Image (spheres, rainbow, N blue to C red):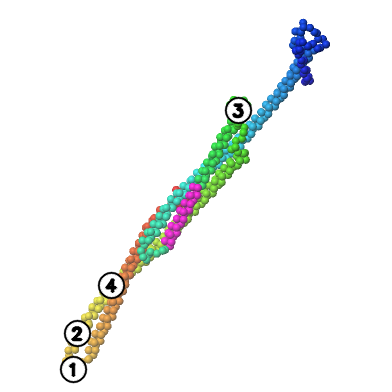
Amino acid sequence: MAQTVPPCELPCKVYEVARNTGAHTSAGLATAGFRTAKYLEDEWFQACYARYHQAFADRDQSERRRHESRQLAAGTEALAQRTQQDSTRKVGARLQDTHCWKSELQREADGLAADTGLLLAEKRRLERALDATAVPFAIATDSLQCRERRQHPDLVRDRVETELLKEAELIRNIQELLKRTIAQAVNQIRLNREHKETCELDWSDKVEAYGIDERCARYSSQSTDVQLHPHSAAHAESTSTPETWAKFTQDNLCGAQRERRASANLRVLIDCVLRDTAEDLRLQCDTVNLALTRRCEELEDARHKLQHHLHETLREIAGQERNVAALKQAIKHKEAPLRVAHTRLYQRSQRPNVELCRDTAQFRLMSEVEELNMSLAALKEKLLEAEQSLRNLEDTRMSLEKDIAVKTNSLFIDRQKCMAHRARYPTVLRLAGYQ
């Protein structure tokens, strides 16, 4: 590159006309007008050289600036390309992160929806199981009410009544447990839906952000739909940092996973509750049925024995009635001999004077009357005893017949009412909420 020559100073113009102070000055008015606004020859050469140097300096400076401009343009172009490529890579990485979080949110939202569906099915099982307990409770209470119509002496608090009371209490406790479990399931379903909505909102935001970043990743310097937005380079006050952005989504995912685990645990709990309550109800039902069967067998055996005693009592009543009739006939048969003896004694008391003798015949007649009176007294006493025994047998017969009727009524209540109603007891599957 040529060296820069400092520009020469321009010669000053001579404007003075009247003054001639130089060595070659001439005096006179004739030449005064030819010196106006003229340069000297040396001044002319100096001015030319100054122009040359100025032109050279300007060309040199222009060439240097052109070179610097080309270097700056190339550097800024390369920097812009590198920066744009780096920004594109960063946007691509952001797209990958957003897609990853979006996929996780979608998976958790779908999982929450599936868990909510399963929990809704378990809730319907609980509701069906709760509805199914109405039949056993009605059967137990109806059986207790029916057995209240038993008559004395069968109106006792036997094993059947004890087991029925236990069954009614068990059903009430199970109903309360099922209601609490349903409330817990409803609350968990609400939490699942809330966290699903949170994940879906986050997912929706990420879908929108993914679309924006995807469009940004496709932009280049050759794009025709780009324009300047000077104020967009400033950070908004509401912007988040990558850490808070990731933590927000991570918290949403953790909340969704927590509710999914809670849903799974609740489903296991519901299944255990339904299975255990169904088994407890069926076990108690079998216990009540067994107690009813044994009670019916006891009643049947007692009624059979009572009927046997009634049959024997009726036969004894018949024999006793015949005995009373025979005693009455025997008493009646003693009246004739007594009248004969009395007549003889009366007639013999009419004997005259010394003929009125206490002879052997007199003594025998008197002893005969005494014997007859004693026989009559014994027969009458025995008749009273027989009649009392007959009355006792009649009372026993009536008591036996009443007791047999009571046993028949108890058997009808336990067998025809209670056991027939218990045939409608729900199955284990229905009590477990499957039907």
Q: Percent position (x, y) of residue 353?
A: 17, 93
Viewer-proximal residue among 183 and 303: 183
Question: Local crowd at mark 3 within 10 Å, few (<14), some, or many (≥20)?
Answer: few
Q: Distance between the residues labelled 1 and 4?
A: 52 Å
Question: Local crowd at mark 4 within 10 Å, few (<14), some, or many (≥20)?
Answer: some
Residue 228 marker? 3
**Residue 424 visible in the current orientation:** yes
Amino acid type of the residue tagged 2 in the rendering: Thr
Q: Distance between the residues labelled 2 and 4?
A: 33 Å
Q: How many labels does the image show?
A: 4
Q: Please check the rendered image and state whether residue 302 is part of the magenta-colored stretch, yes or no.
A: no
Give the left or right position of residue 402, taking residue 217 as reference.
left
Residue 343 marker? 2
Viewer-proximal residue among 102 and 400: 102
Rendered-image quadrant of the N terminus = top right
Amino acid type of the residue tagged 4 in the rendering: Glu
Q: Is mark 4 on a helix, strand or loop?
A: helix
Residue marked by disc 4: 321
Viewer-proximal residue among 367 and 98: 98
Q: Distance between the residues labelled 3 and 1?
A: 182 Å
Q: In which quarter of the image is residue 214?
A: top right
Residue 273 marker? none
Taking the view exactly as shown, the residue that stands out farthest to the right is 23
Determine the residue positioned at 39% across, 55% down.
Answer: 421
Closer to the observer: label 3 or label 4? 3
Closer to the observer: label 3 or label 1? 3
Determine the residue positioned at 42% across, 54% down.
Answer: 136
Q: Is residue 329 above or below residue 202?
A: below
Q: Earlier in the sequence, mark 1 or mark 4?
A: 4
